[in-house]
Amino acid sequence: MTPAFRAPNQPAKSLALPTSWYVLDPIWEGDETVVQCGLPHAQLAPAWQLLLLGDGSPTRHLQLLTGEPTEVDVIDMSPIGDDSEGAPTPIHMVPSPWIRRQVWLRTASGQRLAYATSWWEASHVDEYLQNRSLPIWASLARLRTELYRDVQGIHYGHSAPLELAFGQRGPFWGRHYLFWHHGRPLTLIYEVFSPYLTKYLGPTQVEHQNSL
């Protein structure tokens, strides 16, 4: 199966419908302590830290950065039972059996900006994702759902499928977080961002400058 769209000025590339999910092959990973303290700017630039380590909506951030609505291509909605499939450890805080949802986040004009996998309690996924073509943030905002985004970890690594999908060379930055609702975990989300965003955020690293 080929993707539902092709980003402008990129060659046509086929990408098989995933039977699993696109986890990064890590070069480096950080836990909640790193998330709270932040990273040296030589490792991750301040603008990128706001995107990755902040608790705001990435869908909203991407829209503000690009000036275009952020749209979703759903590529997978699979019942996976109790099989965590190598998902980050906090998946066990979300009651099983699980539904795994995978999407591309893109501009309205077709530029892929991010990949996201989320795991939901199967018995409640339809309650919160009534329109599955909407970004999660938009779906929950329509329901006036009060949420807390709890960033649990940050990742830096390679993925051949994501290089193909983004049309960008890795390595890539990603993160995982829990959405809390009424004191309980609602879903676990794993996101990876395209280096295309350097167009808006600048380089991912700040070069060291010697003081005069």
Image: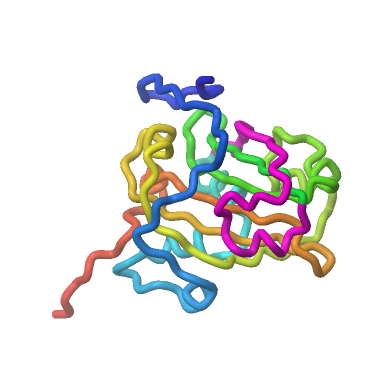
Q: Is residue 55 left or right of residue 6?
A: right
Position of residue 99 measured from the top left corner of the image (x, y, whole percent): 72, 44
Which quadrant would residue 180 be assigned to in this image?
Answer: bottom right
* Above or below, comparing residue 123 to residue 107 in the picture: below
Residue sitting nearer the eye, 156 or 45: 156
Position of residue 169 measured from the top left corner of the image (x, y, whole percent): 31, 41
Residue sitting nearer the eye, 166 or 48: 166
Magenta highlight range? 68-96
Q: Residue at x 40, y 19 (%)?
A: 12
* Above or below, comparing residue 160 to residue 185 in the picture: above
- Which quadrant holds the C terminus? bottom left
Q: Is residue 183 left or right of residue 44?
A: right
* Above or below, comparing residue 126 to residue 182 in the picture: above
Position of residue 144 measured from the top left corner of the image (x, y, whole percent): 83, 53
Tell which residue pokes out farthest to the left in this image.
Answer: 212
Position of residue 124 measured from the top left corner of the image (x, y, whole percent): 84, 48
